[in-house]
Amino acid sequence: MIEGHDFAGFCTGQRQWTVVRGDCLDVIPMIPPEFRTIVAADPTYGYGSYPSDKDVTLKMLRAVKGWRTLALKGYAPDLYRWLHAAGVESVQEWIAWYPTNHACKANGNSKGLPKFHEDWAVCGETPGSGRLMRPRADHKVSQRINELHRTKNKDHARQYDPRGDAREGDVWTDPSPGIAFQARLRLHPNEMPVSLALKLVNLISEPGDYILDPFAGSFSLGVAAIRLGRRYIGIEISEEWAAQGVERLQAEAEGSTLQARKAGQMSLLGATR
């Protein structure tokens, strides 16, 4: 069964986002050709997943082959198997997500070493790689580096400006939301932090681009897309999560949040997109 939240309005440009409930393998062939540009996929993987989940992911990868950009999330061994089986020959960026609260998040039931990081393999164009910035970690460290360079290599002293921002690297440390004693606040069992989603959307797209999220889950990628002025198609097979996704994105488009909406608070902006 396929149900779309005003998909017609999205196709005519009247809406910035749409949520489609159904199997992504059934929905992807229905997407108009002009929207088939960017895929950001966070499928099921790791401990507790089933073999059929990996088959679905592989079929999805084959269905979007030839799209401009693919970002795929998983543990490194899963990503390698998926990309190799799908015939993906090159990866432009490999990002390790290492949450600062990894000790709470790491699965103690996993076989072998607990996995403290998950990864994004990004294939294709990455137009935002030069604009992703982060605050410098420690001004004193930068000052000390300057002193060492001036001492050891006076003729070619390299200056590290301790002020301002630095380029974002390939290790992202955004904390995982709502885990351990905050589990009741979690919107989805595998909720992605919006801060990470914002960086990913910024990396792989430009304002106005279309982003397909075939395993939408918590719809954090949709929140990031709305904030950054991208157009978003979220596909979710679960009726429960799809309904929550519509509510969350509608709240975001109105300048509010899902939590505030559930608490009965009024949005600040009141505008819908």
Image (cartoon, grey):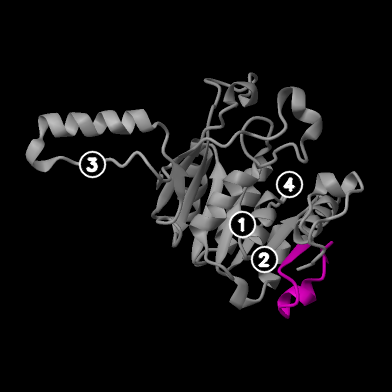
Q: CA distance from mark 4 to mark 2?
A: 19 Å
Residue 261 to residue 97: above or below: below
- Residue closer to the observer: 84 or 207: 207
- Please state which amino acid type lies under the numbered disc 1: Met
Q: Residues within 10 Å of mark 2 (few under 14, many from 20)?
A: some
**Mark 4 and mark 3: span between their CA atoms?**
43 Å
Label 4 secondary element: loop
Q: Which of pointers 2 and 3 lies earlier in the amino acid sequence? A: 2
Q: Which portion, as a residue range, is magenta? A: 1-19
User: According to the image, label 2 marks what residue?
Assistant: 28
Assess disc 1: are there few (<14), some (14-19) or many (≥20) residues with their C-alpha within 10 Å of its C-alpha. Answer: some
Which mark sits nearer the N-terminus, 2 or 1? 2
Q: Which residue is mark 1?
A: 60
Q: Gap in Å between the C-alphas at discs 2 and 3?
A: 50 Å
**Residue pictured at 40% horizontal, 31% vertical:** 138
Report helix, strand or loop for mark 1: helix
Question: What is the crowding at mark 4: few (fewer than 14 residues within 10 Å), some, or many (at least 20)?
Answer: many
> Which quarter of the image is occupied by the C terminus?
bottom right
Q: Amino acid at mark 2?
A: Ile
